[in-house]
Image (spheres, grey):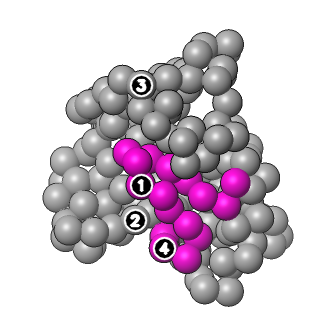
Amino acid sequence: MFTLRHLTSDDLPRLRQFWIEHWGSDEVIARGNVYRPEQVEGFVMEEDGEWIGLLTLFIRDGECEVTSLDSLREGQGIGSRLIDKALAEARARNCRRLFLITTNDNLNALGFYQKRGFEMVAVRRGALNESRKIKPNIPLIGVNGIPLRDEIELEIKL
């Protein structure tokens, strides 16, 4: 049985370690912004205390940005449930939109988000070159051997 709950301040050390393990650093970078665990809120999916899914959000000025989404067990609806929870949170907080950034190599994510109602609204060509100035460990080659260059913004208007 999966449990879905809000992240709490007690989760910060675990969130920091999770990002290091799954994102290569305790910072997430999107659109030139640096997000740290203490700046975000979100939801964790657990099974017997084990984190099997995580979604983090940054909410500001009527916009709700998904800063990270991880499902450690694909095909079980974890990512979908986390997105549904983020949508509900964005609506409850009167956000105009829920949006996120992914990269040009992340073909699975592009499909996943579009199936859930997200639309592509911007491509930032070469954005990862700028991000590497902040976070040099971002690889040059991404998923499926695709050069990692661009950010793609997707949104759902609320």
Quick check: 114 left or right of 70? left
- Give, as a three-letter code, the residue at label 4: Gln
Between the residue at mark 1 and the residue at mark 4, the CA separation in whole angstroms equals: 12 Å
Task: Name the disc covering residue 126, or none.
Answer: 3
- Counting residues from the start of the chain, the first of labels 3 and 1 encountered is 1
Whether tag 3 and tag 1 are in contact, CB under 8 A, the answer is: no
Please name the residue that numbered disc 1 is placed on.
33
Quick check: 136 left or right of 81? right
Q: Residue at x 28, y 42 (%)?
A: 155
Please name the residue that numbered disc 2 is placed on.
58
Q: What element carries label 4?
A: helix
Question: How busy is the neighbourhood of tag 2: few (under 14 within 10 Å), some, or many (20 plus)?
Answer: some
Please name the residue that numbered disc 4 is placed on.
39
Whether tag 1 and tag 2 are in contact, CB under 8 A, the answer is: yes
Q: What element carries label 2?
A: strand
> As displayed, is residue 27 above or below residue 77?
below
Between the residue at mark 1 and the residue at mark 2, the CA separation in whole angstroms equals: 11 Å
- Assign the C terminus to one quadrant of the image: bottom left
Residue at the farthest bottom position: 10
Q: Is mark 1 on a helix, strand or loop?
A: strand
Segment colored magenta: 25-41
- Counting residues from the start of the chain, the first of labels 1 and 2 encountered is 1
Closer to the observer: label 1 or label 2?
Answer: 1
